[in-house]
Amino acid sequence: MRYGYFNDEHREYRITTPFTPIKWCNYVGTLAFGGIVDQTGGALICKGDPALNRISKYISQMPASDFKGTTLYIRWQKPDGTYEIYSPFFTPTLKDLDRYECQVGLSYSRFVSEYQGIRTEITVFVPRDGEVFLQDIVVENLGAARSIDVIPVVEFTHFDALKQLTNADWVPQTMTLKAHRQGDLCVLEQYAFMKRDTAVNYFTANRPVTSFDGDRKAFLGRHEYGSWQKPLSLEAPELNNSEPLRGDNIGALMLHLGELKTGDRQRVIVQLGQAASLNEAAPSIEKYRDEAAVDRAFAELGEFWQSYLSLLQVATPSDSFNTMVNIHNPRQCHTTKNWSRYLSLYQLGYGARGIGFRDSSQDLLGVMSHMPEEALELALKLLSMQKRNGSAMHQFNPLTMEGSQGDSLEEPDRPKYYGDDHLWIVYTMAAYIKETGDLSVLDRKVPFYDKDPQGRPLEEGSVWEHLVRAIEFTWSDRGRHGLPLLGFADWNDTVNLPKGAESLMVANQFGKAILELIPICDAYDKADFKAKIMGYYESMRSIVNDTAWDGAWYVRWFDHEGRKIGTAANQAGKIWVNGQSWPVISGFASEEKRDTALDSVYSLLNTKYGIKLSAPGYNGFDPVIGGVTTYPPGAKENGGIFLHANPWMMIAETMRGNGDRAFEYYNQINPAQKNDILDIFESEPYCYPQNILGNEHPQFGMGRNAWLSGTASWTYIAATQHILGIRPELDGLTIDPCLPKAWDRVTVERRFRGSVFSITILNPDQKMKGVTSLLVDGKKIEGNRIPLLPAGHYRVEAYIGR
């Protein structure tokens, strides 16, 4: 069954039925102000902290048929005096629409629907320079003349999202709503009583409001035995003008459009926002009552995305590859950078995750080429979460800059740090320097996280010093085999072993971090440190190969007693994909071991829906191994297809030179490839989910936890820098594609350091890798790296084979 289609011309996915397998959503605005809009118009809007400053009440666990945060009712009076009432979003009235379409755009959603001759078009978005959620509503009468009413509704939440669910007495006692009228303007002001002097929510429209409701009980009617599907107050000519001092606060506005003859159209702008006071909000309220201002704001949003996406555009023989690389993958990277793991239908906010050190360090890789200065701003915040010993806090609240070690604090007999966190930021800073050429950033001073009793940092150091300490921490924090200690966990953070366990993932991360720093050492005049870390690299490479090779693949861990995990001798978890991709990425694996390990992944872990994280799955809880065993076999980290690990295998195969297999792996998890199997996949086809159930699970192929995943950035890196092979370096732009043999021609337009490079890759002999000739404006360049050139527009031809 098809649920929609891609419209690349408008950079949208168009959902054609409200009955998607699960809730599908889009993001509007940013963490500063914005949130989630689902496919039936429900919206979860917040400002700043999604856990501690929510505005609309959206409970994602409730059935799809329920009202969720916001909606819109339309009605007209029938000849018998009763009202025909429906929602153009379908939910919550659940009346079948004659037409329905949800256009999932770049930071906006547009809903187009028709019902009994009434056509509506509703565009929802947050202006780039504003902190208000706009609903731009156009109503057109296609049928006989009738008087139309529009009733937008929001249900407010207590600002503390968790307390809203856990304290049914205190929360309603604090919730207040008042109406303010001035001329034809009516603004509903809502706040929690203790925050009335610091934060008020407002709900208003640009047309006269004849009546309103602020009390859910009054709006639904009959002591709430009316329902969101059929609010009893809508059966009366006007609403109740309820202004609750306590209770369940909503905002409902009665907007009479008057009589619309056949072909008549009316437009309404509805605003939902938050400010310190209504006086502070007044300029924004007045601005967006003007339809022209709304049009300008929407155009500015489009201009931003046009500029953002134009940094890299491709044309390959694969339509789904083009769709993702040109539009939806970089958009998801942008969303994930902005929201980290802060707000989704699956995460509550800071109380659960906050900004993750490892998460955001990786997220920045996917946006570094597009927005390097904004990426650097967050990278420096991340560095301030690094401790003086070189390790890092696992997560932090960006508003208070308070860090924590997350789950590790809850396990008294486990280490209180994560073995991998601090190494990811090395890749992030190296990516920034390669994209911009800005070595001066290494001199920037950033405090370390350790503080005195007054909360002041005990020490600050240059960015370079932070990177040095990250390397030195891993080198000094090693176990019985000479491998880095696991800490509470490494990337696969649900394997939580007791103190003393060693991680092969961290060992290989360490090797890759050194490779990233070596060219920086050359450019930054750090010859002594370069010699030192090259010694570290060679030593760690020997240790990994001497201790961790299992005959056909690398083991994944040594536990606290020195036993192997990820060995053929294990009953479960015999082989782990990250144990095979990362020795290739780090350069530690010899060609023979590399090929053997990668082929083992293909034969033992690969499935038609993606590469499993491990196999076989654990089938029962094991308190020593930890969280991975809390899932059934085939789910999440326990033998599931954890998508984040798949692009590392794509990268490893391109380093091997196997473009066919790298692209096979790419296609297997490409959500745009799953548009015809959505009854199996279920997740949104326009963004990567976190995980897909593996083939040990009866629901094999089902995706979950969309949008906020490191899969987005790493798959974008795998596609653009390794399959297409367009990689920024300190001294130029490398052209090193590894393509499927069948691709005979690829074009890429890439902006880099003030220039535009129009690149054509030609593959007449159906090879996969190896640029034999590189021409820039018709002149041959030695090797496969375009040197730094004066700003301009350059034509590039790269030949694989002849």
Image (cartoon, rainbow, N blue to C red):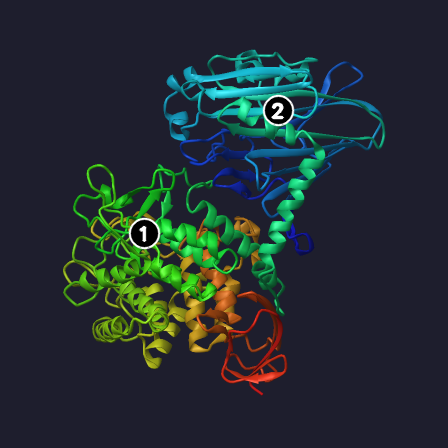
Q: Are marks 2 and 1 in contact (CB under 8 Å)?
A: no
Residue on which disc 2 sits: 204
Q: Of discs 2 and 1, which sits in the foreground?
A: 1
Against 698, is 732 above or below?
below
Q: 218 left or right of 565?
A: right
Residue on which disc 1 sits: 446
Against 463, is 187 above or below?
above
Query: For the point 47% across and 65% down, which residue is it?
Result: 718
Instruction: For residue 730, say whether it is visible.
Output: yes
How would you rate the neighbour count of disc 1 (Cα within 10 Å): few for under 14, some for 14-19, many for 20 or more? Answer: many
Q: 189 left or right of 233?
A: left
> Considering depth in this image, is 7 or 495 the residue closer to the camera?
7
Q: Along the polypeptide, which appears first: circle 2 or circle 1?
A: 2
Task: Look at label 1 and name its amino acid.
Answer: Val
Against 716, is 176 above or below?
above
Please tell me in which quadrant of the rendered image residue 242 appears. top right
Residue 57: x %, y % from top left: 49, 29
Q: Secondary structure at mark 1?
A: strand
Farthest-out residue, bottom: 802
Q: Quadrant of the C terminus?
A: bottom right
Task: Look at label 2 and name its amino acid.
Answer: Thr
Q: 188 left or right of 299?
A: left
Q: Secondary structure at mark 2?
A: strand
Residue 49: x %, y % from top left: 42, 36
